[in-house]
Image (cartoon, rainbow, N blue to C red):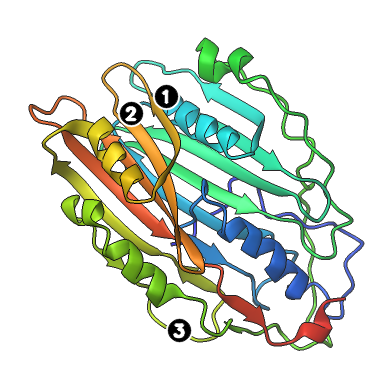
Amino acid sequence: MVVTALVSVATFAGCVPRDGRAYPNATDLSRAQKVWADPWLAAEGTTLAGPNGTGLSRDVAGRSYTTAAEPRAVALAEVRAATSAGWALVSVSCDPDEPGEPGSVAASLGRGTGGDAALVTLEAALSSASGTVVELSAEVPHHLDPGWPASTSLDLASTCLVTGSPTSSAPPSGAPTPSNLDLEDGSLDPPEWSDAGEDGLSTAVAAVADDPVLRELGLTITTPPETGATEARDAAVGRSDEVTTTDGLAAVVARLRAQGWTLTYAGCIGSGAPDIAELTRPAGKRHATLRLSEVPGAAEPRLAATVAVSTPGLQSQSPTRDQ
C-alpha cells in the first residue's frame, strides 16, 4: 500500500535537465529513509520513484486506516501525536458537516528545512459506508530542488480542529510549487535499489511477535515478500480488530510499558469515540510502532490494534549518481 499524495507531486518547469538527472539517486534515498523511520508516521507503504513517468517525484511514504471517530476528532488526535513527535502543524482546513454531506479535514505537518525538510499531508473524510477514512502521505525534497523554506507553524488552539469553525489556513509556505514537465529519456541509467544487506527485518519481526501483550491482543505480523530490487514496498504490519480485554486500554498500556514499550501519545478523541494510545519500542536495527484504540459502546473493554515495523532497508546500486 502506497498512499497517493494529497499535496500534488511537484515539478519545477524550465529548470530540470533532460539528461536523466531527474532520476532519484542516493541523496533522495537518504532523505526518504529518514521519513520511513519516523515513529509517528509509521509508514505502512514506502516508495522511491523509478524511471517511469515524467517529472520529479517526491512521494516517499504513506499509511491509511478507517475509524469510527468523526473526521475532525481523528485529525486532531493525529496532529497532537505528530507535534509531540517533533512535527509542526503548517496548514489545516475543515469542511462543514452539512446534512446529508460527509465532512472532511485536510492538514499538513512539516519538519526541518532545506534538504532535511519533510511534509506530511493528512486527509480525514467521512464515508457513510465505513466510517472515517484517514490517509497520510509524505514528501521530501528531490535532489534537484534548491531546498524547501520552513513553513510557518500554526497555533493548534486557534485552528478549526479545536474551534469547530469551518475555516481554512493558508497553504504551507514550504511546500513545492506544482507544475508540469515533459521530461524526455535521459542519458543516465535508471536508478536501481537493492536491499541494504542484513537490515534486521526478520529479527525485528520475531522480537515484536514474541511480545506477550501483542500475543494477548491477537496481533500477527505479516512480513512483506522478498522482492529484491524494488521501488515500492509494504511494511511488516499486524492488525487486530476489536479484541476483548479484561481490564481496558490503560491496563494494557501499563503492561506494554513493563515490556519495554514507550508511550508516545495518549488521548480521547471525542464523545463516543475511542480513547487511543501510541507506543514505540526498539526492534533490533529497527523499531516498532503500536496504535491502540478503544472500541466505543462495547459491553466489555474492546481494543483495535495495529503494529508496524519500520522499513529502512534499501541502498543505491549507483552511488556515483549522487550529484
Say which quadrant the C terminus sits in. Answer: bottom right
Along the viewing direction, whichever of 92 and 80 lies nearer the viewer = 80
Asked whether the beta carbons under mark 1 and mark 3 sit within 8 Å of each other, the answer is: no
Which residue occupies 32% across, 45% down?
258
- Amino acid type, label 3: Thr
Give percent across and percent down for residue 97.
Answer: 42, 18
**Hey, which quadrant is residue 88 in on the image?**
top right
Residue pushed farthest left? Answer: 299
* Mark 3 Cα shell of 10 Å, populated few (<14), some (14-19), many (≥20): few
Q: Is residue 94 placed above or below 301 in the rendered structure?
A: above
Q: Indicate which disc residue 69 carries.
A: 2
Q: For numbered disc 3, what is the local secondary structure?
A: loop
Q: How far separated are the C-alphas under marks 2 and 3?
A: 36 Å
Q: Position of residue 199 (x, y in %)?
A: 52, 77
174 sits to left or right of 263? right
**Residue 73 bears which disc, if any?**
1
User: Residue 227 shows which numbered tag?
Assistant: 3
Q: Give how far apart the Cα atoms at labels 1 and 2 are.
A: 6 Å
Residue 305 showing in the rendered view: yes
**Residue depicted at x 81% and y 65%:** 143
Q: Is 169 in front, or is 27?
A: 27
x 35%, y 19%: residue: 270
Q: Please tell me how crowded label 1 is: few (under 14), some (14-19), or many (20+) other residues with Cα within 10 Å.
A: some
